[in-house]
């Protein structure tokens, strides 16, 4: 591969690889100290490419999508002034701007169709390598984590782990369907798609499965290559479905048989990958010798589209089986209240508090229609108005979340991004471009899940998603203007040097200071990130006297007066300093912020004797 081609393809694949890296090494953490270093590196790459004149001018859909996404990030930054959690609002703004930078990199850096296809194949194989590594951990690792019989390793939030695996399906299928690619590459990409789908089944995430069903309908209805996609998709799906029993075995296993069932999951995932790759190799060798007539292709394409639509309906029916109508009525009631699960697979058991989350988000959006309550403000808002025992950080629905937190302004920007992305991807899919087909499938699957979950917040999911979307949108043949390149470089450098790296370093210094019992370092953490409460939390933990603890707790309350946790810590510090009246007032403020908090109520009862 020529050096120039490598220089344009490798950064895009590496940006996609940041997602699995965060998943593998940081368990998919959304804490700023666990992902902002990756954001800073992406920003430096974008700035370097812009300064070198390597970025191409995006087409109109790509330019609108990038601008809308950057605008949403800037608006989230503005909401710092009225949100209950300014540091988290800053993190949310930084995350959205990172997504915009990744989208710009994938749209503008590859200079030809060949380079985009190489980036697509590299990304597909990267997903496959990640899924195989997960399978090896399940097979040979020391006690991989399975929460309620569902894979919670390496990403601890199960639905986010499923979302990352789901992103690997359509790139592999689109690459495997390319007749001009090398047979071994096509077979490997098909194996990557199959093992990624097996990971989704292992996680048993209903949101991920429904997102994939939705994406299948979208891709096969709108793509100009539905006939060529049908065989690879059928192979990957059939092999995975055949292994469904061992893949979901830990959900049904007794505690003393759980480890053996997890080992079997790893074996099944590796088997799915190998069988799909071998079947894919046989198919590609046969495919190179056959050229069906155009009329046959058209008829097969129509039959494929109808078959996929029927399969999607059947998939939903299987989830509701054995008595679809009765099961739907039961699960509609269960979905409004948390309930115990007795099904043989989590995919057949509904029941959560999402409807209450959505009710609170809609109610809050009516009260704050224009500017919203501020980015990341749903968590504190729900504690006051929620009816469930849960304490969710997000609304579990991207549109409702943006509407509540960022108001009509944020929702318009989000709508502009979605409209531009899907317009560009659909046009490319109709033109039979493999990168656009992969981007359309991955984006439809991810957005479908984001409408019922909070996977947007996970950079482990978002970074590879925006790479795939950007490869599908493509750029023009003209280089970015000198003024535009300077603006992009300046904005990227400013984000890296003023937000990403300082926030990351502050978080790491605060964590290490607690570990080393070195409070003197905390002044640097506070200087690097004035919005973060982490230095004051560390001072509270390291305080040697009750007075020092009280000073740290008071600083936390001043920083975020609408935080239940900080008001509680302040009340506990006041109680330790033998100031019961002030402690009672602080605890009552905490109780007003979360009326159902049992810990605060117990602390108040403990003050009665003082």
Image: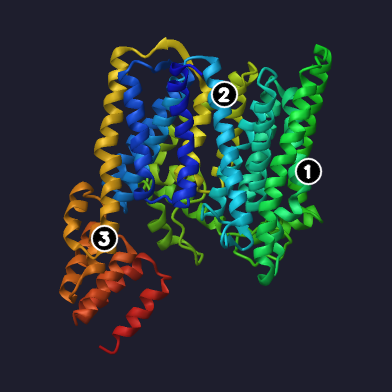
Q: Are marks 1 and 3 in contact (CB under 8 Å)?
A: no
Tell me the CA gap for discs 1 and 3.
51 Å
Residue 211 vs residue 330: left or right? Answer: left
Task: Please say if 330 is above or below 105.
Answer: below
Q: Quadrant of residue 66?
A: top left
Q: Is residue 560 visible?
A: no
Q: Is residue 166 at all visible to an observer of this figure? A: yes
Q: CA distance from mark 1 to mark 2?
A: 27 Å
Query: Which residue: 58% across, 62% down?
Result: 147
Report the mark closest to the observer, 1 or 3. Answer: 1
- Give the left or right position of residue 94, taking residue 163 as reference: left
Picture coordinates of residue 305 (x, y %)? 76, 28
Would you name the residue on which mark 3 appears? 561
Residue 425, disc: 2
* 342 vs 151: above or below: below
Which of disc 2 and disc 1 is earlier in sequence? 1
Determine contact: label 1, label 2, CB under 8 Å: no
Are the residues tagged 3 and 2 within 8 Å (C-beta)?
no
Distance of label 3 from label 2 (alpha carbons):
45 Å
**The C terminus appears in which quarter of the rendering?**
bottom left
x and y percentages locating residue 321 in the rendered image: 79, 54
Asked if residue 352 is positioned above or below residue 176 in the image, the reply reads: below
**Of helix, strand and loop, which one carries label 2?**
helix
How many neighbours does mark 2 have within 10 angstroms: few (below 14), some (14-19), or many (20 or more)?
A: many
| Residue 314: assigned label | 1
Q: Give the class, few, some or many, for how many residues have Cα within 10 Å of label 3's Cα (few <14, many ≥20).
A: some
């Amino acid at each position: 591969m020529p050096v120039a081609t490598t220089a344009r393809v490798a950064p895009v694949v590496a940006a996609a690889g940041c997602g699995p890296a965060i998943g593998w090494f940081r368990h998919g953490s959304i804490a700023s100290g666990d992902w902002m270093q990756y954001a800073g590196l992406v920003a430096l790459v974008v700035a370097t490419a812009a300064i070198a004149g390597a970025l191409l001018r995006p087409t109109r859909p790509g330019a609108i999508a990038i601008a809308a996404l950057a605008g949403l990030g800037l608006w989230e930054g503005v909401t710092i002034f009225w949100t209950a959690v300014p540091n988290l609002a800053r993190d949310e703004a930084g995350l959205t701007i990172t997504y915009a930078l990744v989208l710009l990199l994938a749209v503008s850096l590859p200079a030809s169709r060949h380079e985009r296809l190489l980036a697509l194949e590299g990304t597909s194989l990267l997903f496959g390598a990640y899924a195989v590594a997960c399978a090896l951990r399940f097979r040979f690792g020391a006690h991989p984590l399975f929460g309620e019989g569902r894979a919670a390793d390496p990403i601890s939030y199960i639905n986010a782990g499923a979302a990352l695996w789901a992103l690997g399906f359509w790139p592999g299928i689109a690459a495997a369907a390319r007749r001009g690619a090398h047979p071994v590459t096509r077979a490997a990409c098909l194996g990557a798609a199959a093992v990624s789908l097996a990971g989704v089944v292992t996680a048993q995430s209903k949101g991920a499965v429904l997102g994939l069903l939705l994406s299948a309908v979208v891709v096969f209805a709108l793509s100009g290559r539905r006939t060529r996609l049908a065989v690879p998709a059928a192979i990957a799906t059939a092999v995975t479905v055949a292994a469904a029993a061992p893949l979901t075995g830990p959900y049904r296993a007794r505690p003393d048989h759980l480890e053996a069932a997890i080992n079997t999951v790893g074996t099944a995932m590796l088997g799915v990958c190998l069988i799909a790759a071998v079947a894919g190799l046989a198919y590609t060798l046969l495919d190179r010798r056959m050229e069906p007539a155009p009329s046959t292709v058209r008829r097969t394409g129509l039959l494929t589209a109808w078959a996929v639509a029927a399969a999607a309906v059947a998939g939903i029916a299987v989830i509701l089986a054995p008595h679809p109508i009765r099961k739907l009525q039961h699960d509609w009631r269960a979905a409004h209240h948390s309930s115990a699960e007795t099904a043989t697979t989590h995919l057949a058991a509904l029941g959560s508090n999402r409807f209450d989350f959505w009710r609170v988000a809609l109610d809050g959006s009516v009260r704050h229609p224009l500017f919203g309550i501020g980015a990341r403000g749903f968590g504190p808002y729900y504690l006051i108005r929620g009816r469930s025992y849960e304490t969710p950080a997000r609304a579990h629905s991207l549109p409702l979340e943006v509407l509540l937190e960022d108001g009509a302004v944020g929702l318009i920007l989000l709508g502009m991004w979605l409209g531009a992305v899907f317009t560009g991807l659909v046009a490319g899919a109709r033109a039979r471009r493999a990168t656009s087909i992969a981007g359309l499938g991955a984006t439809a699957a991810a957005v479908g899940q984001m409408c019922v979950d909070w996977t947007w917040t996970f950079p482990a999911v978002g970074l590879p998603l925006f790479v795939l979307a950007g490869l599908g949108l493509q750029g023009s043949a003209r280089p970015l203007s000198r003024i535009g390149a300077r603006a992009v470089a300046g904005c990227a450098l400013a984000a890296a040097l003023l937000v990403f790296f300082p926030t990351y370093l502050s978080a790491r210094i605060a964590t290490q200071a607690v570990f080393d019992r070195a409070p003197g370092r905390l002044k640097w953490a506070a200087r690097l990130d004035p919005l973060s409460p982490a230095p004051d939390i560390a001072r509270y933990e390291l305080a040697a006297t009750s007075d020092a603890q009280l000073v740290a707790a008071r600083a936390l309350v001043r920083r975020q007066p609408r935080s239940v946790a900080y008001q509680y810590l302040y009340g506990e510090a006041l109680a330790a300093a033998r100031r019961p009246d002030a402690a009672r007032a602080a605890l009552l403020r905490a109780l007003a912020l979360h009326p159902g908090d049992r810990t605060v109520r117990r602390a108040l009862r403990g003050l009665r004797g003082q």
